[in-house]
Amino acid sequence: MENSMDVFDFSGALSVISDALRYHKVVILVVTALVFSLAIFYHWVWPPLYKANAVITVEATTDIQRDNFYKEWNPFRKEDGRTEIELMKSGAVLKQVIKQQQLRFNDVYHSPMTQLSYFWETSWLGRNYKSLKRWILGESELGKLSPAEKELAKTVKGLRAGFNIEVAGDVLAGTVYAKGPSPRIADITNTFLDAYLDWRTERQLQEARQAFTALDQELEKQQVLLNSMAKKRVNFLSTNQLVFDFNKETLELEQLVSLEADIAGTKINIANLKGSLTEIETQLAQEPPTKITNSVAELNSVREEARLRHMGLQTELIRQKNRYRQNSPEILELQSDLEKTKNLIDTNPRLIEKSIQTGLNTIRESLIGERSNKKTQLAGLEASLKQMDKISTEFYIRHANVPQLAEELPDLDRNYRIAQEVFALLSTKRAQAAVSLSAGTSALASYQIIDYASRPASQSWPLAKYLYPGALIFGLILGVFAAVLKNMLSGKVYSRHLLNDTNNTPLYATLNMTQNLGVDSIKLRTIKDQKS
């Protein structure tokens, strides 16, 4: 039955390891000793690691009850919860911790690469390499820093790497994990927490101070602007003679409407009076200045005589017609006389005034009096109309720019109201900043320390009880691996492999080589002898 390629040959692997253990014991021992020596060297030169833990809490970003309570008291007391965690490891806080604890680079946590870099920088080879590099390339920007500045920068970096803050939950309760080579890690951690709390309070007070100063300056500017706008508005009202905005103009417009109605009525009355005067003048032209008041009349003697003569001629004509023809001279003469007497009768009145008494015409005098009265009324109405026209013209002149003023004044009022609102808002905010500045140290912070760190009882690493057994085990494993690798790379074939060969490879004899007195001797042993 053929062997499957997918099946691992455990017996072969164990055989390889067994050969390595049998024939390469020295390699295993050397590698194990080397690894163990490295562990001892690591334990000797590598700085110890101490750990300490502290518990903090930060208010949630949304906390309606607290936010409403501190809204008008101290709005600067709170940051976003995640921002608090980031700000805790800021450079300002870490520098304050370094200053208070008088820390140096050897007192803070070093990552493995940082520690190796430190070994390299402090070694003789590393120092000379840097000197050669500066001699060839010149001084770098980093090299221009003073040793104290370099030390501080490395200390800040190491201290930041030594702190890890983990939070959980809506309230953002978290644990501060600190590690470092100094047994004072608990003191460093507690100083770190207190330093952040002090820095946080000072930063919030500084924010309140800056807000108060900025608001105070803006408030002064707004006060000047508000006074300027108020003065501009008063000047606008005074220049345009506006009283209580447009109240006076509104009343004047109402009066103007009434005045125009009065002017129209006055014009109608004037037209009536002029028409009446025209009619009176017409009647006066028809009335004589004087009129007969009393007269005595008698019959007109001339007319009476003519009438009697006419009657006598008529009688004579009748009589003569009987004697003469119609066209006879006698008849024609009589007819002519009759015509003349008739004309005389017609041209003379029947009565003639014997005596006449005249006097003033009362109708004319009445008309003259009424005309004088009408003229007086007309003069009064015309004078009144002239004055009303003058007042109306003045009203129109004064109110000609009222529409423009009505557009300008609301703009002034709107800007003035906006300035007042801005001033009131700035005043409120400045008062709030003043309250925050006064109560900045008394308001409960949204960041609190629940449990300070305790001093560690022992170092966390390296621990000999774990390091040395682990190094021994790892050295043995690495030694076996090196022995197996050496065995595979050597190319030797051992007789027991051939004797236990399952592939039926023909083997006739083996050569046993020994060295005696400088002469190699070869002894041939048959397969039968070896098996026996």
Image: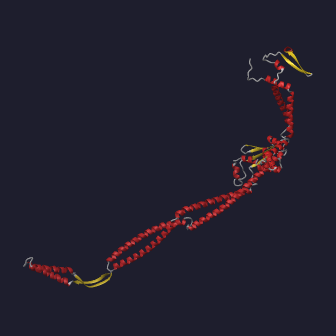
Using the image, determine if residue 513 lies above or below residue 419: above
Residue in the image at 84% along x and 26% along y: 20
Q: Is residue 283 visible?
A: yes
Color theme of the render: secondary structure
Q: Nearer the viewer, residue 263 or 510?
A: 510
Using the image, determine if residue 312 lies above or below residue 223: below
Q: Residue furthest bottom?
A: 355
Q: Residue furthest left?
A: 323
* 341 lies left or right of 489: left
Quadrant of the rendered structure where residue 114 is? Answer: top right
Using the image, determine if residue 54 lies above or below residue 71: above
Residue 377's spot in the image, x, y percent? 42, 75
Q: Is residue 196 visible?
A: no
Q: How many marks do you count on the picture?
A: 0
Q: Nearer the viewer, residue 45 or 146?
A: 146
* 417 lies left or right of 124: left
Q: Nearer the viewer, residue 155 or 467?
A: 155
Residue 335's spot in the image, x, y percent? 13, 78
Residue 92's spot in the image, x, y percent? 77, 50
Using the image, determine if residue 194 lies above or below residue 482: below
Quadrant of the rendered structure where residue 212 is? Answer: bottom right
Q: Residue furthest right?
A: 517
Q: Nearer the viewer, residue 70 or 192?
A: 192
* 373 lies left or right of 224: left
Residue in the image at 86% along x and 38% along y: 41
Q: Where does the N terminus fall, quadrant-wise? A: top right
Residue 278's spot in the image, x, y percent? 36, 73
Q: Where does the C terminus fall, quadrant-wise? A: top right
Residue in the image at 23% along x and 82% along y: 351
